[in-house]
Each structure stands twice: as structure tokens, then as C-alpha cells.
Amino acid sequence: MRTKFIAGNWKMYKDVKEAAALATALKLVLKDVTDVDVAVCPPFVDIYTVAQILKDTNIKVGAQNMYPKTEGAFTGEISPLMLRSAGCEYVIIGHSERRQYFKESNEEINTKVKFALECNLLPILCVGETLEEREKGIMKEVVKSHLTGGLKDITADKAVHVTIAYEPVWAIGTGKTASPEQAQEVHAYIRELLKGLYDEKTSQTIRIQYGGSVKPGNAKELMSKPDIDGALVGGAALKAEDFEGIIKYNK
């Protein structure tokens, strides 16, 4: 049985003071949660402060990106070793905003996933189609490209440490949400792709999150689907009461 995994992507929100306040609130309201794995992914400048506040709690900390080198003359970049030293256990890789605005390719994303694993960071690999791609009927081709490209040359024993986040781009920050049935259809498709890439056991071990306007009001219905193993939450992760409502969807 896969444990649900819900992560909050804070994107480019919250300065250090605001991040500390949110982390402190989450520490209080989520202190008794034991049935769901929880992580928050603040901006780089907030990570150390948030990790210190959440130390010795059930809430893990992740980053929103990384550069696939341990160190070097790469102005403006952050290495996975730096992230680990700041308190990170997870890192989001290949988010649609990285693909869209920063033109990250499947090859670059694959390099990051492999390097994160080498450095003992747990990747959250994002896949998902735009509205145009869905309307063209190429949603499955896009998702397959993102998944197989991101996992290229990653063996099954490593792949089980990767979380897949299916995020239909048209549902991110728009208020639109894929219906639970639409989301389940794609999650089942991803699970089948994983079986083809690896084997049945591996495909049943890897967790697949849904992302795209997840809120307390729709979390329970989404989580009830057999192949939806959690959520990558954007806007609703920025308020403690909203994130709490998603985490405690079954209460």
C-alpha cells in the first residue's frame, strides 16, 4: 500500500519572515499527522530557516530546482549538496514552469534527476500537457515523452525513489482542475508506462501525485482514486489552513 505524499510548492512567494511564519503554523497544525507524508518546497532563500523550524517534525523540506553539479563557477545556481546542507530531502525537477519559461528539455531534466539521486536527494519529476496539447489529442504522447525522457537510463532500484507529479498545465493556478476521472485516467496510464519501463513491482511502488488547483474541497475525491498517491500543491500550500485541509482530507 503506497503512503500518500502531499508536497507544497511555494513557488516565488514568501520572504524569510513570511516563510518562517508559515512553517511555524504548519508545525502546529500538522503535528499529529502520521498517515500522510508531507513536504514543503520554499524558495531557495527560505530553505534553511524553514528546515530549522521543521527539524524533528513529520514535515520534510524540498527545493524547487537544482543545478546538476556539486560546485563550480556557475553563477546563480544551487547545487544538490548545498540543498542537502540547508536541510532538503526532496527536489522538484522539470516543473511545467521550468519547461515553459526556462526552456528546460527532457535531456536537462533527466540529467538533474540522475544527479539528484546520486546526491541522495529525492526527485519529484513533473510531467503534464498544456491545454493546446490536450485539445490536439496528443496528451498521452506528451506525458510519455516527459516520463520516459526524465527517467532515461535510471534503473528500477533508483526509480523507486522518484515521485512522479502529473500536472496538466491548463489546471495550474487557473482554478480549473482535471476531474478525478480525468486525473485517474492519466495516472493509470503513467502507471502502465512505468510497468513497461521497469516491471509490475516497480510500477506499483512509485508514487504518482496530482497537481493542478488542488484544494481542501476537491482533495478527498482526488485521493480516493486508486492511482493518485498524493498531490503537488501550489496556491493552497501558501495558507496553513488550506494546506492543512488538503493533508487532512480523510478526517
Image: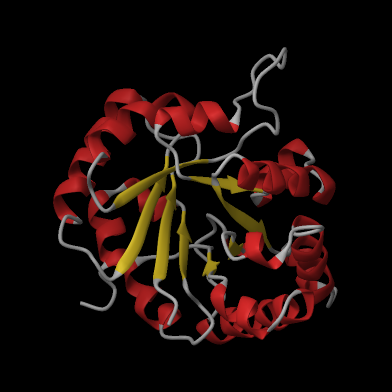
**Residue 43 position in % (x across, y down):** 47, 32
Residue at point 72% right, 39% down?
101
Instruction: For residue 212, say whether it is visible.
Output: yes
Q: In this view, does 37 lie to the left or right of 89?
A: left
> Which color mode does the image show?
secondary structure
For the image, the number of numbered tags is 0
The quadrant in which the N terminus is found is: bottom left
- Residue 197 versus residue 181: which sits nearer the camera? 197
Q: In which quarter of the image is residue 97?
A: top right
Instruction: For residue 135, say whether it is visible.
Output: no
**Residue 178 position in % (x across, y down):** 57, 75
Q: In this view, does 236 lie to the left or right of 139?
A: left
Residue at point 78% right, 80% down?
196
Up the image or down, 224 lies above or below 125; here it is: below
Residue at point 42% right, 55% down?
7
**Residue 151 position in % (x across, y down):** 75, 59
**Residue 59 position in % (x across, y down):** 30, 50
Q: Quadrant of residue 135?
A: bottom right
Up the image or down, 230 lies above or below 25; here it is: below
- Residue 29 versus residue 74: which sits nearer the camera? 74
Up the image or down, 152 lies above or below 74; here it is: below
- Residue 167 versus residue 52: which sits nearer the camera? 52
Q: Quadrant of residue 127?
A: bottom right
Residue at point 48% right, 62% down?
213
The quadrant in which the C terminus is found is: bottom left
